Image (tube, rainbow, N blue to C red):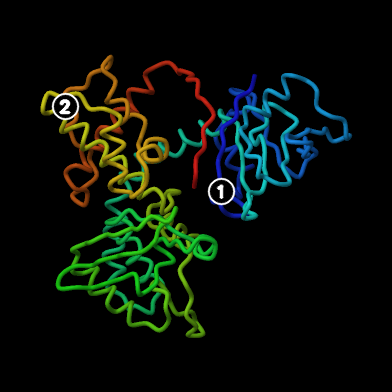
Amino acid sequence: MARAMSVDVLECRPAGLADLPQRFAAIGSVSEETGLVYVSDSEPGIRRQRRGKGFAYRMPDGSIVTDPSIKSRIAALGLPPAYENVWICLDERGHLQATGYDARGRKQYRYHSEWQALRSADKFAQLTEFGKALPKIRRTIRRHMQGGVENMQTVLAALVALLDEAHLRTGNQAYVQANGSYGATTLLKRHLRLGDGFIELKFTGKGGKRVQRVLRRPKLQRLLEEIADLPGRQLFVWKDENDALRPVDSGRLNRYLTDMAGTAISAKTFRTWGGTLAAFTVARTSIERGEWPTIKQMSEAAASVLHNTPAISRSSYIHPDVLALADKSAPVSARQLQARGRSGSELRVEEQRLLGFLQRSARRKKRLPARVTESRPESVVF
């Protein structure tokens, strides 16, 4: 029986998924290896209909679903009763298994577990490339930060510097309007306080959590002082060719990052890097003390850096190879974790160690036969 994994998204189209057909093909021989089929909820599907205290499920021809295997697959999707206009894929191997709208009218998606596993593996595989590109990114933003504050490039550089230091969520206007929650691109000037040698950010983040960051970066502080003097309430804005103020959005930010790095990365990768780095540091120091790291310790360390829950940190922000350091059946020596990757002096010592570890893990995997792992349905929130 096919398994399904869910992804809850708060926009009409999930970020990074607009180009799914291309990304689906780009993964390689995914359809041959897994048998998954790319589908769309614009195709005919099973519809959910309220019936008494429960639901009936109807096929495209109007007939009621009675097949036990189909009913079992639908139950495994875990679709909340509050979802409206529910569409369920006819094909148990469809990469997209279901869609629906929650009480706030936001479209939600349920993906096949194997599709989600492929996307997750692809995301973490890019983390090594991100670590290798990070020195170039830091050199570039340092140069761009020397420009005028009305220049889009200068404002973007300041924003990336903030992401690099504080590991903030990117944010978008949909979250601001729906929940009053903010991220890096939607910060207001009232969220920023510049003191004697420090930068303080205080705002409400995703899920209503209070976020507070204190940084000591003199060059960034001087630039933020100038940016904050620009007109308007929003912090990160730039002037277009008509001298109109334009807010920075995640699309423009991600294009800027990709152009700098020379490889496809997004602002969210800074959070994945930060969470993985925090987990790796805890694991390495534990092993150096002769103790065994636990997944709980690593997840809590990442959560403290990212201001989310340990469960979310573990599932979405810590590289699986770092989590594997808790596996007592495959011990790693402290000396192995001290070795550094080669990516220049722009990386901090602990970052160099993490990059070295990820590079060695990738090389080791290439020498090992492929392994398939089973996974239970779970919810991932972007």
State which tag comes first along the sequence, 2 or 1: 1
> How many other residues sit within 10 Å of disc 1, few (<14), some (14-19) or many (≥20)?
some
Residue assigned mark 2 = 287
Looking at the image, which is closer to me, 94 or 65? 65
Q: What residue occupies the far left of the structure in this picture? A: 289
Looking at the image, which is closer to me, 18 or 382? 382
> How many other residues sit within 10 Å of disc 2, few (<14), some (14-19) or many (≥20)?
many
Q: Is residue 105 left or right of residue 248?
A: right
Coordinates of residue 77 in the picture (x, y in percent): 62, 31
At horizontal 32% and vertical 23% (from top left) the residue drawn is 364
At horizontal 41% and vertical 40% (from top left) the residue drawn is 312
Coordinates of residue 246 in the picture (x, y in percent): 48, 76
Between circles 2 and 1, the one closer to the viewer is 1
Image mark for residue 9: 1
Whole-number angstrom distance, CA of label 2 to CA of label 1: 38 Å
Q: Quadrant of residue 228?
A: bottom left
Q: Is residue 146 left or right of residue 261?
A: left
Q: Is residue 22 left or right of residue 91?
A: left
For residue 370, above or below residue 99: above
Coordinates of residue 142 in the picture (x, y in percent): 26, 64
For residue 190, above or below residue 122: below
Looking at the image, which is closer to me, 157 or 246? 246
Q: Quadrant of residue 61?
A: top right
Coordinates of residue 378 in the picture (x, y in percent): 51, 33
At horizontal 41% and vertical 50% (from top left) the residue drawn is 268
Looking at the image, which is closer to me, 361 or 167? 167
The quadrant of the rendering that contains the N terminus is: top right
At horizontal 38% and vertical 57% (from top left) the residue drawn is 260
Image mark for residue 48: none
User: Circle 1 sits in a helix, a strand or a loop, which is it?
Assistant: loop
Residue type beneath disc 1: Val
Evaluate if marks 2 and 1 touch, with contact meaning CB atoms under 8 Å apart: no
